[in-house]
Amino acid sequence: MHSPANTPVYERVRRNPKFHELVRQRSRLALILSAVVLAGYYAFMMVVAFAPGLLHKPLSDDSSLSVGFPIGAAIIILSWLLTGVYSHFANGRFQDLTDEITRETLQ
Amino acid sequence: MIARRILLAGTAATLFALPALAAGDVGQLEKQPVNLSAIGMFIAFVVMTLGITYWAASRTRSTSDFYTAGGGITGFQNGLAIAGDYMSAATLLGLSSLVFAKGYDGFVYTISFFVGWPIILFLLAERLRNLGHFTFADIASYRLDQGKIRTFAAIGSLTVVCFYLIVQMVGAGQLIKLLFGLDYNVAVIVVGVLMVVYVTFGGMIATTWVQIIKAVLLLGGGILLAFLALSRFGFSLEAIARSAIASHKDGVKIMGPGTLLADPVSAVSLSLGLLFGTAALPHIMMRFFTVPNAREARKSVFYASGFIGFFFLIVCVLGMAAITIVGTDPQFFEGGKLIGGGNMPVMHLAKALGGDLFLGFLSAVAFATILAVVSGLALAGASAIAHDLYARVIRKGEATEREEMRVSKIASLVLGVLAVVLGIAFEKQNVAFLVGLTFGVAASVNFPVLILSMYWKGLTTRGALAGGIAGLISAVTLVILSNAVWVVVLNNPAPIFPYEQPALFSMTLAFIVTIIVSKLDSSALARAEREAFEDQFVRSQTGIGAAAAAKH
């Protein structure tokens, strides 16, 4: 399975400018989304550790639920929606681009 | 007042079981009377899954069928199966009981269990699918030394599989003693035998369908229970919260973070272990090879995280509702303690809301859950032995498909026997430390080599080996020095390593050692390995070459 270095097929892909465009755009999307999820989550964890009082505040004056619950639920729901965003682009535009590259390479 | 005192005792029991949450450890439990409706429903599940295994056996001809269901699972089906792998008995019982005992702190745990999924999709899923064939060792050894790295990766997988199998077997035994009223040994043997039957005859096709059926049952049961619970409170979360504050001994404090994760180092170490440990569990990674292409792999993570997130939110509602419904009902307490131990609130909730029949159903689902998870583990272990160690390392790719299949079936049989023997041997042990080890080893041994081999051109065989060994030794040592072994097993007064999860330290060390040793490696082999990255990179991004590779 050790592929010989610089197989011609892969060399052709590397010469295709579309490949570099694909890698650049898709990696940027993946990194931005990861950063959003991780930053959101670790910011939340730091509030839990250092300023728990913020999450204890009631939703409204006569409410028993604290603001912590909708915030926590939002972290779960929003990060799930971001997987939808990634899948939408990766399975749409980026997949088309990948298919194009594959077709041009294997011709 | 009585209810509040009762809750206090229940809390202590839950805290004791807390480090074990990630798996299925429920502690030492009293055997309960035989529960016929639960056993009946479990038998119905077994009959159905055996039928599926019979059908799957006729379709399992090649190694590709056996390890990856021939890549013929759709994104949606695979999403359900991944969700099934992740929604273990522990998430249903453990997370709900944590919310029951600690309120909001339990919710924070739940969130930590979830956030790894988007990261897996963004950074790993695509490349996993494009580079791997059957196992994670395929990826780790793609451009590195086949013999050394594949052996090391296979051993890493097997270590994780064995630790996790023991935890699940002990959990199954204890749970069944409690829920079905059967002997511990009977439960362990039943799980072992069924697991071997599913895996040897039905391979990945049967394992996946067992997982899908279980996921549907678990989701359905959870939704029904949440519906019944909400109906008690006029479908108002506000009413549940108000009533929970009135019933819980900590009162309004349960509405926000308490003491559980007050220490940021613990919180970060635990979350790193869960996040990256999950990503590097062999039976989870294996799921990315069962779909036909990267497109379906992405879809499956989208569906899986939707199901998991939804289920986790439901579990939290169940925990909050149980504070009132179970926590103030004396029938669920005996001598001030929750009957069956701290992990039982959701089971009691099922009995309170749906009677014995619903309790039986949920018990059967909990058992089915363990069965499905151990089958996935056994298959992952068998593929590490047969595909990595036997076919690739020992026979150097010369083994015929028939021979490899035979070895994989023998391997699953051996793993089954081993799981039963270890499950019985560990009956009286507190296996909480094995959970720390499972995730610690996965995050510190498997994860660094996996991510660096895909993302870092400079990785070399020497670096990967040195870093992996550093991760293994440090993770194991820190777990031994932590509370779960040093105090609970070895009876020392205080732990030397104060945190529950070693990942923050052992994973960091593994990365540092890997990078330094790789940088210092100036051998000719290292140069060739760095050069091979460019081709690997193209394939990991485009999947060109992956489709053909999956056929062998």
Image: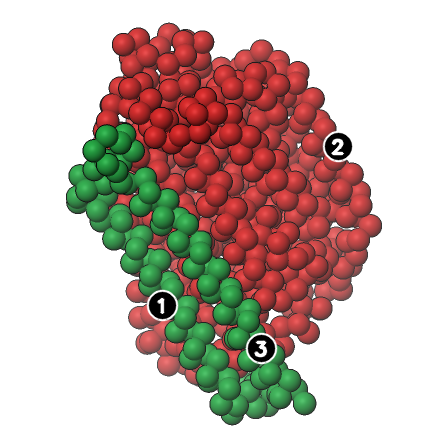
> Would you say B1 lies left or right of B74 here?
left
Q: Chain of mark 3?
A: A
Disc nearer the start of the sequence (3/1)? 1
> Mark 1 is on which residue type?
Ile
Report the Cα–Cα distance between label 2 and label 1: 47 Å
Q: Which-is-in-front pick, marks 2 and 1?
A: 1
**Kind of element beneath mark 2:** helix
What residue sits right under mark 3 in the picture?
Answer: A96
| Image spot of residue B211 (x, y percent) | 63, 43
- Is there a contact, CB below 8 Å, between mark 2 and mark 3? no
Numbered label attached to residue A32: 1
Q: Residue at x 62, y 67 (%)?
A: B293
Q: Do the residues indicated by labels 3 and 1 lie within the same chain of the protein?
A: yes
For the C terminus of chain B, the quadrant is bottom right
Which residue occupies the foreground of this view, A42 or A2? A42
Q: Let me know if residue B293 appears in the view.
A: yes
Crowding at mark 1 (Cα within 10 Å: few <14, some 14-19, many 20+) = few
Q: Residue at x 71, y 50 (%)?
A: B205
What residue sits right under mark 2 in the picture?
Answer: B47
Numbered label attached to residue B464: none
> Mark 3 is on which residue type?
Asp
Which residue occupies the foreground of this view, B321 or B463? B321
**Kind of element beneath mark 1:** helix
What color was chain B assigned in the picture? red
Report the Cα–Cα distance between label 2 and label 3: 44 Å
| Image spot of residue B186 (x, y percent) | 63, 23
> Mark 2 is on which residue type?
Val
Q: Chain of mark 1?
A: A
Report the Cα–Cα distance between label 3 and label 1: 21 Å
